[in-house]
Image (cartoon, rainbow, N blue to C red):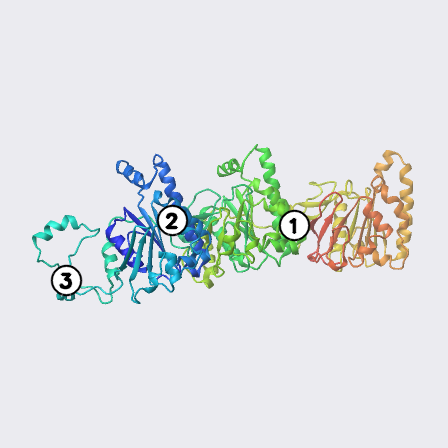
Amino acid sequence: MLRTLVLSLALTHSPEDLSMVLVDYKGGAAFSPFASLPHCAGLIDNLADDPQLTVRARSSLHGEVVRRQQLLKAADSSPNITHYRELRLTRPDLPPMPHLFVVIDEFAELLTAEREFVDLFLQIGRIGRSIGVHLLLSSQRLEAGQLRGLDTYLSYNLALRTFSESESQMVLGTGDAFHLPPLPGYGYLKVDTSVYQRFRAGYVSGPVPRTQQIQQRSDGPRVTLLPVFNTLNSQQSSAEQSPTSTPELERPQVGVTLVDEMVRGLRGHDGVVSPIWLPPLPPVLPLGTLVSDTERNGRLAPTIGLKDDPVKQRQAPWTLDLTRSGGHAVIIGAPQSGRTTALRTIAASLALTHTPKEVGIYGLDLTGSGLRRLEGFPHVGGVVTRGDEDRMQRLLEELTAMLRAREALFKQLRIDSMQEFRRLHAQGRIPSVSSADIVLLVDGYGALRSEFEQLEGLFTALMMQAASYGIHLVVTMGRWGEMRMAHQTLFGNRIELRLNDPSDSIIDRKLAGILPEDTAGRGLNDDQLIGQIALPIMDEADADDVGEALQALAQHVARSWTGPSAVPIRLLPSHLPLTELPDEFDEPHSVPLGLRQDTMDTTFWDLMETDQHLVVLGDSRAGKSTTLRTIADGLIRRFTPDELAIAVVDSRGHVGAAIPEEYLAAHARSPQQANGLSQSIATELAKRPGRSATEAATAPRIVLMIDDIDIITAGGVDPFAPLQQHLPMARDLHFHVILTRPVTGASRAMYAPFILAAWETGGAMLLMSGDRAEGQILPRVRPERMPAGRGRYIRRGDSPFVVQVAHETSDPSND
C-alpha cells in the first residue's frame, strides 16, 4: 500500500513540486526501491537498531520545518508555500521549495522509542499546510491514546483489514475494516465526514507484465506507454490518430518488479531534490579525507574529524579552535572510547597544517605509550611516559620556563595579544622563541592528580596562566570529577566521548546516552553536535595498523621539513664535570654547586647572603661526600689561604684528603678529635664580636665540614654543642657549617639541637636520594630515590628545585 502511494505520487509529480522523506522504523525493505528516486530527500531505516539515528531523524525533520519557516519569512514574509511558489516564478533566485511528503512506517513504535517525535508531529499538524509538509503515518497496530492528539490534524484515514473491531473503530469510527476480506489491498478511505469509500489498492511489487501477456487481454483496456509525469493530454491527439497502434514494451530483466522499473525510468530526470537526510557518520574516518599534507591555513584550529548537524542538514569538518576562550581543550571518555586516538589525531592534524616554527607539540602519557608514535614528527619536542618521573618533572619545568620567557617578551616588546606575537614571530623578530604556539597533550589527567601530586602545582600554574601566552593544554580524563570545578572553566573546548555514566555529561545527557558503545571516537562537542573523530592516518587502514601508519606519516612529514625541529626536553646530565660550571672569574663570590633542573641554569651555594649553612641528607652512595668536595673546590678557587680556613670532621677521610694542606686548618676523624676541634673554633669565634670592623673583615672565613655527623654523634654525646651558640651570628662571624647525614632516621635527627640550629639560622638543605617511607623531612618534603649526585635543594622562601651536583671524578657516588 505504501509503495503504491509513493510510486503514484512520484509518477504524477515532478521533483520540483514534490519531495519525500521515507521512514521505516524497522528494517528497510518497505522503501528500499525508492532510494534512487529523484523525489527522495531522505530514506531513513533501521531506526530500531540505533537510538542515535532516531534522534537524528527527528532533528533532521525539525530542521526542515525551521528552514521552510525561514524561507517564507525571507521571501517578503510569504504567508504560505503557495504564495512562495508563485513569488518564485518572478524571483528565480529564491531557493526551490517543493511540497514535502513524510511517510513513516511503524510510527507507533517510533513514538514509543522517541517521545519527542509527538511534539514534532503536532507542530507539523499545526503549520504543515502553510509550509508544505504533509504526514502519512502507518502502523500495523494502534492502541487507544497512541495518537496523543495527532488525530485532530489527520484529515485522511486509510484502514486495511484490522486485527480487531476496536482498531477499526479508532481509525474509521466503524468496525468495517475488521470485516474486510482476508486478501491484500482491500481497505476503506475516510476523508473527514464527506468521503467514506471502500477500495482495493494497486500492487506494484510484482513482476512487470510481459508484452505477450498484455496482448492476450485484447478485450481489456489498451495499455499506452506514457512519458514521465503524465503528459496524457498532450499525447491524446496522437493517440486518437492511431487508435489501433499498440506500443511495444521493453522486455524487463527477470525478477525486475514494476516499482523497480518505474523508479528506473524516473531516475534520469534532471530535477533532484535537496537532501534532508544525510548519510550517517562513518564509524571509521581517515584524517586524510579531511586534511591535506600541503594545507596551510595558519589558524590554530586543527581539523579532528567530521561533525554532524542534522538540523542544518550538513556535515562539516570538526575543528578544535585553541584560540577561543580558555585556550585549552579537554576530552572526556570511558576506556576504549578513543581518547588517546583523539590526541594523536590532534597532533597529526597540527603537523599537517603547521610548521614546527608555528607549533611545537609535547606529550605527557600517563595511561600507556600511545603517544610515543608522535615522536617522529619534527613538531614534537618529546613524549614522556609515566615510568619516567624525572622527564615528567622536566617537561613541566621546561614549559614553565617558556611561560616566564614569554611573559618577559610581552612586557619588553609591548605585545598585547597572541595575534601580534604570532605576527612578530612569523616576521623573525622574536628569534629566541622556537615555536609561536605550544601544545601539550596529556593523556590521563586523573592520574596526574592522584599519583603525581608533586607535579600538580606546576600543571595548575600552566592551566591558569599559559593560554594567554600561546601555551595550550589538551587533556583527557575518564570523568569530569577528576578535575576541580574551578579549573573546568579554563577549558574553552570540551569533547565528550562515550561515558561510563551518561548522566555525568555536562553537554547533553540525552545525547551522551545514545552514543554507540562499539564506535570509538564518536562524541559530542560544545555545540551539542555529534561528531566522529578521525584516525590519524591518510588512507584506510586496519585497526592494528594505525600505529604503523601514523609513524609512517610522521616520517613523511619529517622528510619534507628542512628547518629546525621543536625544542627537545632538556634533561639533567647523570654526570656533570666541574669544568662545565662558571669559574671564579665569572662568579667570584658564590660557590657553584651544579645545574638546577627547572631552568637548567647553574645553582650556587650563596654562603655570603642566603645560605650561610648547608645540611646535606642522602643515603649511601647518594653523593654526600662528593658534594662536600665540590663545595671545597669552589671555595678554594675563590679564596686565598689567608681568607679561608677549612676544618673537616670526616671519620673515613674522603673529604679531608681532597683539601690542600694550606687550606686545611684541622682534620678530625673521631668524636674526641671533633670535640677538641669544636672547642678551638668556639674559642676563636668568641673573640670575633669584640674586634674592630677592619679586624673582622680581614678575619679568615671558617668553614666546618662534617661528613656523616651520625657517626660522630653515635655515642650520644654531641661534640659540636660548643658551636651551637654561635650559629645565629655565623654570617657576621664569617663562620659556616656544612654537614651530611643519611636520610634514614633524618625525620628524627632534624630535631637534634646542632642540626636544627644549622637549619633554622639561615641554612639551606640538599635532600638527596632516600627512602620515601622515611616520611616528611620538612613540611610537605619527602625523600625519593634519585640518581647519584642529584638532590632537591630547599631554601627558605623559595620553592624546592632539583639540582645535579658537579664533581671531579667520573663517579659522583664515590663517597
Query: Between marks 2 and 3, how big is the CA–CA gap?
Result: 41 Å
Residue 742 lies, in percent from the top left, at 78, 57
Q: Work out whether residue 199 or residue 679 is closer to the camera in this orientation and state it.
A: 199
Q: Residue tagged by mark 1?
A: 456
Q: What crowding class fits label 1: few (fewer than 14 Cα within 10 Å), some (14-19), or many (20 or more)? A: some
Which residue position is annotated with label 3? 220
| Left or right of 304, for residue 772 | right
Quarter of the picture containing the N terminus is bottom left
Disc 1 versus disc 2: distance between alpha carbons? 62 Å
Q: Residue at x 89, y 59 (%)?
A: 715
Looking at the rendered structure, which numbered label has been put on residue 153? Answer: 2
Let me know if residue 26 appears in the view.
Answer: no
The three-letter code of the residue at mark 1 reads: Glu
The numbered mark, 2 or 3, whose residue comes first in the sequence reads 2
Please tell me whether residue 286 is drawn above or below residue 17 in the rendered image.
Answer: below
Give coordinates of residue 382: x percent, y percent: 56, 52
Viewer-nearest of discs 1 and 3: 3
Identify the secondary structure beneath mark 3: loop
Q: Secondary structure at mark 2?
A: helix
- For marks 1 and 3 on the same chain, the one whose residue lies earlier in the sequence: 3
Question: Could you tell whether 266 is left or right of 764 in the image?
Answer: left
Picture layout, residue 154 above or below residue 95? below
Which residue is the extreme one toward the top?
414
